[in-house]
Image: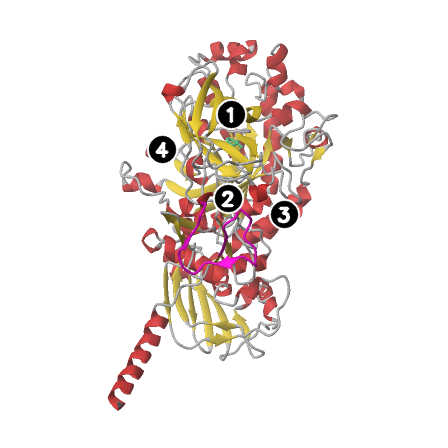
Amino acid sequence: MRNSLLVTLLLLLLATNISTAQQLCPIVPKPAKISFGNQAFVINTKTVLVASPELSDFAHQLRKMLVNTGYDLPIASGTENVILLRIDKRLQTLSNEGYKLTVDKDKIEITAAHTKGLYYGFVSLLQLLPSEIYSKSPVKGIKWEIPAVTIEDQPRFAWRAVMLDVSRQFYEFSFLKKYVDWMSVHKINVFHIHLADDQGWRIEIKKYPELTNKGAWRGDNEVLARAYGSGKARYGGFYTQEQLKELVKYATERNVQILPEIDMPGHSKAVIASYPQVKCQLNGELSASTNVYCASRDSNFIMIEDIIKEVASIFPFEYIHIGGDEVWHRYWEECPNCQQLMKDKGFKEVGNIQNYFIKRLEDIVSKQGKKMIGWNEIMEGGELRKSTAVMAWNSLNVGYEIAKKGYQVVLAPNEIYYIDKRQAIDERGWVNQIITTKDIYDFNPMANNELTKDELKNIFGIEVCLWSEKLDRPYRYPEFMTYPRLCALAETAWTPQEKRDWNDFANRMGDYHFSRLSNLGINYRLFSPTAKVENNLVTVIPPYKKAIVRYTLDGTEPSLKSAIYTHPFKAPNINSVYLKTFTANGYTSPSTKGIDRPAIGHWTPSDCSTTLKEMTFDISKQLTSIGNWFVEFRYVQGTSIQIESVKLLENGVLLSEDAHVGTAGIWTSNNMYRLPLTSHSEKATYTISVSFKSDGNTDSQGDLFLSLGYNNEP
Ligand code: TNX
């Protein structure tokens, strides 16, 4: 009896020891090295910040990051209950951004070769505290305890970035600051702002006031036409140079560099609308549609130089982004002056004009003491300076090819890192592709066997891009699109590949990080549940260990009143099982509507024709109740199809029809067809008849899905 008690005690002791050793790391992105000790440090009235005089300003800044503890930490000397900041040049081996952080009962010590590293040490320190440290204001009644740890940390990539397109939608200045705040929590260090595009010019340029007087606005009485939900009313805005300087200062304090982008020579409708002389000499429709600078006008380069000069004076970052993407060469082909330029310069193809233009931009940028970066199309038509960096967006392979050529590359491949794409099939997004947080997390940008180690070193950064065409609504959707996908990018960019593991990350998000995002006030997308179904038995897969999953069986949104999932259940209709994740404090994910719904049919190249064609599918098995049913066309590959109408028939008799033009392709629009069913008969045969044609090539392929409308509403 006594013996077994002893054994139990021993086992218990062992178990607690193991659990401290295996303690889940709370920090996102996960540090390169972390180990846990035993006795925690507690911030209290005795705590002081200790820093040498030259770090005094910096210490004051860090001190503010702890205001939520309610303790106004003095900067003083001391030996007990101290937070010590120290520069140690020997830590240069961890790069400027690396740091060491040790926490024990009496002392916290952060050391780094540079204040950038000290800052990141502090960012990690905050994530060892209760998540209320990120609240809007001081929180009472919390024990501000920091577990004993030893961390040695440094980033995997030098360039860890997010891009925000402020042209297609205009964001209030205050939003930019919040965006910076949030990214700095994740050790993201480059904020790329897409300041000029066809739909709006967003930066004050003193020498060319019309750029913002006119080019920042669209609507029915403006030089720019309405676009993407902006409507008839005047829509737009811009940032003054004062504001942008303030943003730079704000970002610098948070280790964030601002990369300004002025997209040229294409995507320049806003410039052309404000200063029409910059476009090519063209006639008719071409003249009206052009969004490309004329390459033959020398005064265009003078204007660009003036603009870049002002841009360079606002942003201290060593790079300026000049765009360079999607330039429609058609305009240069049709412009007599550009044709003359080709003859004069002995250019063989219009692509050489692109190279000529980009090289002149290189000269202009380097005259300001800056390096140039541009989208991968800047590589068209000839070589560039090796100091020029390339942002690869067309595909991952394009990025690798350019790195192979010896250029510095930032990978921003649209197929993985475009966070304007939807996160689930029934959410808003630019194209049909779904990119989840897991997709971003699971991708290793350095996994390429074709490149040598040295060539791979040319890939010095990774970046996600938030294009804004479809972000006009709902309110705060950009936050939902950015988080938590940016958390996944941050960990890819910071943490050594061998330390990355999706389950570990998902649990860390669930245990710690989602509540930080909540306290920061971010409208993030909580992970939705998934499920497996076998013979109507539903087994839910919670997205992380502590996830609370609630479900309904009747196609209604799960609420706090719905059943909590505990074990597999039988569902009469899989289509109307809805699942939703809830956090402990009631924040919810979007619902998973229906589980693993199989397609009700497909279209293949052999079904395609360039004239209208009918296809019929029997859906009696799936159409099990009354309600607003939707048929959705999901493109898989090939060219797109155009759908003209979808009919629902009962025993061959027409019940309802939705006739509207929809497209299913890489670009998808109006591809859902609504077919209300007001009475349902068990014995009837239900079929749908689809009328569609394909665009040009007949190699299109895709699937048809059936779903019951949300809450039975259209
Ligand atoms: C392509 S990415 C563009 C953008 C669009 C984006 C939409 C790039 C350099 N050009 O202008 O917003 O696709 O996903």
Instruction: Decide: few, some or many residues near mark 4? Use Cα within 10 Å; few <14, some 14-19, many ≥20.
Output: some
Residue beneath label 2, please? 162
User: Is 645 on the left or on the right of 542, as rendered?
Assistant: right
> Residue at the bottom extreme?
2
Residue beneath label 4, please? 397
How far across and down, in percent of the image, does residue 406 sit?
35, 34
Question: Most prominent secondary structure in the magenta stretch?
Answer: loop
Inter-mark Cα distance, 1 to 4: 28 Å
Say if 714 sits above or below 56 in the image.
Answer: above
Q: Which residues are magenta?
A: 550-573
Q: Earlier in the sequence, mark 2 or mark 1?
A: 2
Inter-mark Cα distance, 3 to 4: 34 Å
Residue beneath label 3, please? 175
Inter-mark Cα distance, 1 to 3: 34 Å
Disc 2, SS: strand
The colour scheme of the drawn protein is secondary structure
What kind of residue is marked 4?
Asn
- Cβ of mark 2 under 8 Å from ligand 1: the answer is no
Does 591 appear in magenta?
Answer: no
Instruction: Decide: few, some or many residues near mark 1? Use Cα within 10 Å; few <14, some 14-19, many ≥20.
Output: many
What kind of residue is marked 1?
Thr
Q: Between tags 1 and 3, which lies in front?
A: 1
Residue beneath label 1, please? 663
Q: Residue at x 31, y 53 (%)?
A: 498
Inter-mark Cα distance, 2 to 1: 30 Å
